[in-house]
Image (spheres, rainbow, N blue to C red):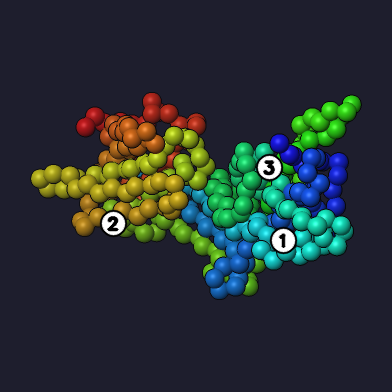
Amino acid sequence: MGAPDLDYFTDIRDVRIYRDHQNHSRWYITPAMPVLGRQKDGTPDYSLALYRYLGRKGTSDSGDFWVRGVLTLGIEHSRKPQILPEMRKELRSRGFSSPEIRSMPISKTRITLMFAGGQNFGTYNTRWTGGALVLPLDARDAEILWDAVAAGQTQVSVSIDETLTGVRKKQDQWEPDAVAQNRVVAVEMDIAAHPDHFQRTDLGARMKKGYTGLDVFCFDFVENLEENLYAKIVEVAIPTAGRDLVESVTFRTGSDYRGRIAFKLAKDLDQPYRYRISRIYKDGSKKTGQWRQKTGEALLDITAYQNRTEENQETEEQ
């Protein structure tokens, strides 16, 4: 079976291709140069959302401060179809009568955000064809990035490292080998030119007299915290006369990391609300947790962070 000869390559129109080690009419084209995509209106495909919550005396959580940021970048990483006929034409002019072009095998792709020390978007054991990159930011990085954007001093870079696989001839034998390819996409985030790409929401200001609504956050699927998790459901119950009023929101792969629960009735802020989380796994099984209790907060983050355990949560049996 043929494979790319990593010691035999040529460049056509600034595109590198490797020849097959057995069939010299077969060539393997390397991945395209990644670029920042465009939104439907033609503007650069990036956005930054900053969510902040400041507790107040009236909600019994004065002094509590919560910050969360989300950076989204759209990266295009595919070649235009017309490049292949052009490459075949060039190869025929070099003496290859019936050239065949295939995609270069990729064993691993690692994507890293180059800002504030670098953060890993993800590692894929295959070719990455581009798309939306969504990176949750902790309080420190979210504030640093927002301040830099506001000052007009920000340039974020995305590093895409790909491992190209093939063979090399060593002592008259072909042996598997690999070569690294690194590409960097620079992203200049301009809040003056594209103010609608930036959003800062102070969640605490929404709550005055009751839990008329609750913002719920779940970053499990964005961060791929649990491989076998299919969906995560949170139920929220507020005390009302006669029985609790219960509303729910569901998160899954591809859904928004933020949900909104709107209650038909308000309640006294001095009274806690309750919530419980159910996990549905890809094998169809379901695990429902205990009811937990919160007081005086206008947001609920149900992400299964590694440093958070159920033992340090205040729980209440159903």
Q: Which residue is mark 2?
A: 262
> Does residue 44 appear to the left or right of 153 in the view shown?
left
Residue type (three-letter) at the residue carrying disc 3 = Ile
Q: Which secondary structure lies at badge 2?
A: strand
Instruction: Give the residue furthest to the left.
Output: 242
Q: In the image, residue 246 lies at what x, y percent?
A: 22, 47
From mark 3 to mark 2, how far is it between C-alphas? 46 Å
Q: Choose the circle earlier in sequence order: 3 or 1.
A: 1
Kindly report which numbered mark, 3 or 1, lies closer to the viewer in this rendering. 1
Q: Nearer the viewer, residue 170 or 275?
A: 170
Q: Quadrant of the C terminus?
A: top left
Q: Residue at x 50, y 40 (%)?
A: 224
Residue type (three-letter) at the residue carrying disc 1 = Leu
Q: Quadrant of the N terminus?
A: top right
Residue type (three-letter) at the residue carrying disc 2 = Ala
Question: Which mark is drawn over residue 106?
Answer: 3
Q: Choose the circle earlier in sequence order: 1 or 2.
A: 1
User: Label 1: how many residues lie within 10 Å, few (<14), some (14-19) or many (20+)?
Assistant: some
Q: Residue at x 43, y 29 (%)?
A: 309
Q: Which secondary structure lies at badge 3?
A: strand
Q: Residue at x 34, y 47 (%)?
A: 250
From mark 1 to mark 2, how far is it between C-alphas? 53 Å
Q: Choose the circle earlier in sequence order: 3 or 2.
A: 3
Question: Which mark is drawn over residue 84?
Answer: 1
Tags 1 and 2 touching, CB below 8 Å = no
Q: Which secondary structure lies at badge 1?
A: helix
Q: Residue at x 87, y 58 (%)?
A: 94
Q: Quadrant of residue 117?
A: top right
